[in-house]
Amino acid sequence: MTRKEQKEEKRQKILMTALALFVERGYYDTKITDIASAVPMSTGLMFHYFESKEELWLELVKMGAAGTKSASGAEAGEIPPGIYLEKFLEQLFSYAKDQPWVFNMFVLMGQARRSGMPEEARRVALSVDTIKDTEKLIKKGQKDGIFRSGDPELLSRCFWASVQGIMEEMAMDKEMKAPDPKWIMALILK
């Protein structure tokens, strides 16, 4: 392994450790020394990777935002909306079981959107509008007779609130099984 690869591996270890601690303790109750200790590495060495806790938080939020953009339905193309969303849920739950940090990322992104969080990271978190993108899919599905009638924005919010809640529960309870995506789809299907 090259030095560059070792450095990137260490950087990823810091990010995943920080993600777990931020979810467990919250942003303000997680100290940079806690993260360094859990990696483990010296606090001084950690500053070679990230200049501050806020920079580390921002990097995690950017990762979450990038992942969230692909989940919103903006890339559905010609795939029927009902099939797109159900397959998305299947893949999300399957991937998250293999990569448990995904559950934590949902929790972190929920935290990052709240007022009182570091402003730049909050702006990044709020820049991804899964509600609006999924609302467009729901409107298309309503037009095609697939989705129930009703306010498409509210249906989108309910869909994503369910996904968010499930991901948060699974982050806290590692033994919880993923629900059948059809249960969540039942919120919006006709």
Image (cartoon, grey):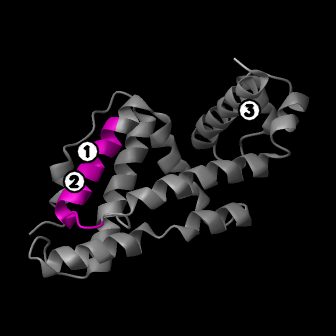
Say which quarter of the image contains residue 114. Answer: bottom right
Q: Is residue 46 magenta?
A: no
Q: Give the x, y percent position of residue 130.
A: 42, 67
Marks 1/3: CA–CA distance: 32 Å
Question: Which residue was labeled with disc 1?
Answer: 90
Question: Which residue was labeled with disc 2?
Answer: 86
Marks 2/3: CA–CA distance: 37 Å
Nearer the viewer's eye, disc 2 or disc 3? 2
The span picked out in magenta is: 77-94
Marks 1/2: CA–CA distance: 6 Å
Q: Disc 1 vs disc 2: Cβ atoms closer than 8 Å?
A: yes
- Quick one: label 2 or label 3, which is nearer the N terminus? 3
Q: Secondary structure at mark 2?
A: helix
- Please tell me which residue is depicted at 34% across the width and 64% down the height of the picture: 73
Q: Give the x, y percent position of residue 140.
A: 21, 77
- Please tell me which residue is depicted at 62% across the width and 53% down the height of the picture: 61
149 relative position to 40: left or right = left
Q: Give the x, y percent position of residue 4.
A: 76, 28
User: In this orientation, does residue 179 appear?
Assistant: yes
Q: Disc 2 vs disc 3: Cβ atoms closer than 8 Å?
A: no
Residue furthest front as drawn: 2
10 relative position to 175: left or right = right
Within 10 angstroms of label 3, few (less than 14), some, or many (20 or more) residues?
many
Say which quarter of the image contains residue 158. Answer: bottom left
Between residues 8 and 141, which one lies in front from this camera angle? Answer: 8
- Please tell me which residue is depicted at 71% across the width and 44% down the height of the picture: 29
Question: Which residue was labeled with disc 3?
Answer: 35
Q: Secondary structure at mark 3?
A: helix
Q: Give the x, y percent position of residue 150.
A: 19, 81
